[in-house]
Amino acid sequence: MVHDMDSVHALVEDSNHNSERVMETIGGLAVQERWQELWSLADKIGKEVSILVDSEDRVWVDIGTRGRVALSPPIGSSIPFVLWVHTHPWDAYWSSTDLNTIASHSFILERAIVLGFDHLKVSRRLDSKPDRGLEEEGPLSKWTDEPLVYYSESQINDSEESTISLERLLQLSKESNEMQISDIVEAVVGPDYDTELLELVKAAFEGNDGSLNLSQMNEGILAIKQWREKQA
């Protein structure tokens, strides 16, 4: 639940950070994916905040210190946790503490988001190693290392589309020793692609001087798809 923001800000200014209205609003902003408002509220509080969503979609909120907030699975929560969101004072990045936290909860956590002042970072746990993981080996090797996303709904949706299509491409690479371009396009955009898109992708791949990794293939095909949609 998101309460009237003027009343929430008044409570924060009076240092009532742990009041029910403030805590419910922090959780509500996360559920509604109002990321910039959530970061701004944490900034007004002057402390990092953490939101944990469990397998039953229950939301658990913690307020930490100016420079740190822990992921603390509460008594009564249900695993796996589908999402852990926390804020940083300014820039969104995976600190050593964040990486240790994700690693130690890797088998009971599905997705993590860290919020900065005008951007966020997302990481997701895959069933197999992504093209770019948070680490080469160990539990973090199955967590995606994704680029910054700025607070724009379209950019966030694009980021999620890219991660899902990359998962399909990774699965295809496991199942096939020699991937055809048509199979690659279908893995990225689905079976409803047309001949023109396929020809554009073929031309782009053939015009590339070096070999492309799976992530580059995925991003390239999505970029061509989005370019066509803008031209329509």
Image (spheres, helix red, strand yellow):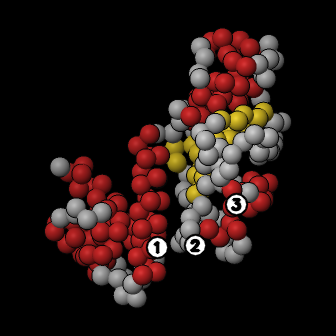
Query: Residue placed at 33% from the left, 74% from the top?
Result: 184
- The amino acid type of the residue labelled 1 equals Leu
Task: Return the mark for residue 50.
Answer: none
Q: Nearer the viewer, residue 121 or 182?
A: 182
Q: Give the mark, 1 or 2, whose residue is nearer the N terminus.
A: 2
* Marks 1 and 2 close (CB-CB < 8 Å): yes
Mark toward the viewer: 3 or 1: 3
- Mark 3 and mark 2 in contact (Cβ < 8 Å)? no
Q: Position of residue 113 (x, y in %)?
A: 62, 47
Q: Judge left or right: residue 84 versus residue 19.
A: left
Q: Is residue 211 left or right of residue 197?
A: right
Q: Mark 3 to mark 1: distance in Å?
A: 20 Å
> What SS does tag 3 mark?
helix
Q: Residue at x 44, y 59 (%)?
A: 164
Q: Say which residue label 2 marks.
A: 129
The residue carrying pointer 2 sits among few (fewer than 14), some (14 to 19) or many (20 or more) residues within 10 Å by Cα, namely: many
Give the percent coordinates (x, y) of residue 217: 39, 71
User: Is residue 18 among the parts visible in the rendering?
Assistant: yes
Q: Nearer the viewer, mark 2 or mark 3?
A: 3
Residue at 22%, 61% in the rendered image = 192
Residue that carries the numbered disc 3 in the rendered image: 106
- Picture quadrant where residue 187 is located: bottom left
**Could you say which disc has been placed on residue 170 in the image?**
1
Q: Can you give x and y, in whole percent of width and height, for residue 219 in the image?
A: 40, 64
The quadrant of the picture occupied by the N terminus is top right
Indicate which disc, 3 or 1, sits on the residue closer to the N terminus: 3
